Image: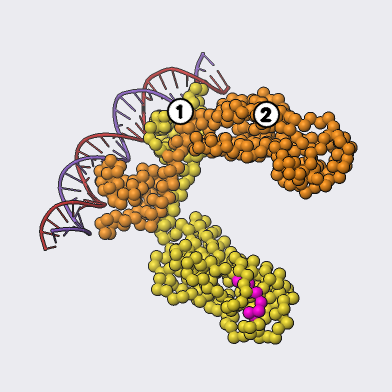
Chain colours: A yellow, B orange, C red, D purple
Amino acid sequence: MSESVRLEALEVLDAIDRHGSFAAAAASLYRVPSAISYTVNQLETELGIRVFDRAGHRAVLTPAGRLLVDEGRHILVASRELAAAARRQADHWEPELKIALDAAQKPADLWPLIAEFTVAYPAINVRINEEVLAGGWEALVDERVDLAIGVADPPANAGIRRMPFGHIEFVFCCAPGHPLTAAPQPLDDDAIRAHRALVVADTARQFAPRSGNLIDGQPRLTVSNMHTKIVALERGLGVGYCPRPWVADALAEGRLIALNTEARPTRRATYLLWRRGERGRALQWFIDRLGRDAGAS
Amino acid sequence: MSESVRLEALEVLDAIDRHGSFAAAAASLYRVPSAISYTVNQLETELGIRVFDRAGHRAVLTPAGRLLVDEGRHILVASRELAAAARRQADHWEPELKIALDAAQKPADLWPLIAEFTVAYPAINVRINEEVLAGGWEALVDERVDLAIGVADPPANAGIRRMPFGHIEFVFCCAPGHPLTAAPQPLDDDAIRAHRALVVADTARQFAPRSGNLIDGQPRLTVSNMHTKIVALERGLGVGYCPRPWVADALAEGRLIALNTEARPTRRATYLLWRRGERGRALQWFIDRLGRDAGAS
DNA sequence: CATAGTTGTTCAAAATTACTGAACGATTGG
DNA sequence: CCAATCGTTCAGTAATTTTGAACAACTATG
């Protein structure tokens, strides 16, 4: 009456079910029929139940046996996958790579690369979180992600390695009918402060939240992601800076208007960030590929 | 280089991780330290990787070893649960009991019973589908469920056993401002046919769908469940028969009005239905408990 | 800086477990 | 009814796992 089923028994059950008889299963496992009998008997005494009904002298699975076969196959697969995953891990392939993508980057830009990776390495899971402002940095420091893409102005930190990734241009936008469109440009802080600012909430959980491009004293409408911010801008709910790639279409189609503002940096360098030390091959692959295209964006 | 990890090795790894050393693990498994060494070595050669780093002469898990421990525990749990599930199955406890609840019954009426069952038998999963008209019957015949509760007017069938469950009273309802409220009662078919009928779609997939209480030629608005039907009735989108338990509150609060209709049976017997033959203990438990209260509803 | 108490390894022997092969009874299909 | 298949049993053998003793490396403690 052992408390757990033995993997060997599950293999034997699987073979019997797959080949239709003890004899055929024995042949498929390069063993002799009595060895199959032996294992099945052992399983039955261990579990204290009947797994096969031997009435018609062609052994047929009992309901409990059926359960063992069906569920047992999941366990067999899992234990094979675990062996494979351990070998990959030992070969410096992490089982899962977690990526933080800064909200200023368009997720669609990353999809071709993800697609290429998952085709080449189907066993490695990839998980992408979109993070805003300090969120990507914090996720990296907290080891919630392995790689942060497109973070602007990251603080210096001995434990974090960085590589220039590109530049992101911020455009001050509002809807066509918005009162600010009538104001003289370049807009000064006072002109801007009179109108509600649309901001994307920083996803940082514990570091001091940063407010990007934000002028104090201005009324705010905070939304949870860049897409919502742009929709809200188009509806005239406020004004704010947006990454150019996100608003290029809306500007071209006249759904949003770009306005000049005074002396505020609109172009910022962005970086690829990862923790120093052990670098898995999947992480290295992404650093290589993203670094190769750097500056293009 | 076997393709799968052995359960014995996972037990040993788990014990080492849990107790902190080979020696302590050996003690906990009532074995001698060299046996632990043996199993670990065997695992390492089978996988072709290092599982422990023996540099500091206090063996420490490699990343691959940590993966094996963490993921391996899931496999150990699964194989123990499989053994237990097989024993329960052999003891005529089905691993999962699937119940079809007729839309005319209020799901809330079943919750106390479900709660009682899951406390008494936490290992047995219960799944409830709500089915409309022929849907419950069909789900039973198709073996998608094991028990159908509250089905009205089930066809006779040699493979299906039944037990009277109760009665369900249907009330013809409409919103307070609806034109039918001004018509003389009892309403005849012509009066009813002039107004849109709200019907709940039959969930039957292959049997001829039944239309409950429906007069042909009448315009219809079909919705997917009883709750939606009642909301739609309250909004004045149509008229129709509803089970009294579902509309009792709405009638009492005046959100719906009950109207008399001509010569149509408004009270129907409902039944508990299950397939004849092997009857698992969970099924028997529900039949006993539901049968005991029969007639009360 | 000993020293006692760890920890994990190795190896031959012992114990246990799994597999084989032959003999046998039961069932199926032609 | 005969030949072919199927699964079981059982004694013997092969393979694997466990043991116990000897050993080497490290740690903490006085």
Which residue has dot 2 on it?
B166
Label 1 marks a residue whose chain is A
From which residue to which does the magenta span run? A192-199
Helix, strand or loop status at disc 1 = loop
Looking at the rendered structure, the kind of residue marked 2 is Gly
Q: Residue furthest front?
A: B253
Please report, as a chain letter, where disc 2 is located: B
Percent of width and height locating residue B187: 86, 36
Nearest the viewer among A43 and A242 is A242
Residue B150 in the figure: left or right of residue B44: right
- Rendered view: A121 above or below A151: above
- Residue situated in front as seen by the camera: C13 or B171: B171
Residue type at mark 1: give it. Arg
* Labels 1 and 2 share a subunit: no
**Residue at the spot 76% in from the left edge and 44% down from the top edge:** B254
**Residue B287: mark:** none
Instruction: For mark 2, give the secondary structure.
Output: strand
Query: Residue A272 location in percent, x, y?
Result: 50, 72
The reply to whether the magenta stretch includes residue A194 is yes
* Displayed quadrant of residue B206: top right
| Image-quadrant location for residue A114 | bottom right
Q: Quadrant of residue A234?
A: bottom right
Is A16 a magenta residue? no
**x and y, in percent, of residue A287 in the image:** 48, 69
- Compared across the picture, whether A110 is left or right of A184 comes to left
Residue denoted by label 1 = A50
Q: Nearer the viewer, residue A123 or B174?
A: B174
Looking at the rendering, in which quadrant would you find the C terminus of chain B? top right
Label 1 and label 2: CA atoms lie apart by 40 Å
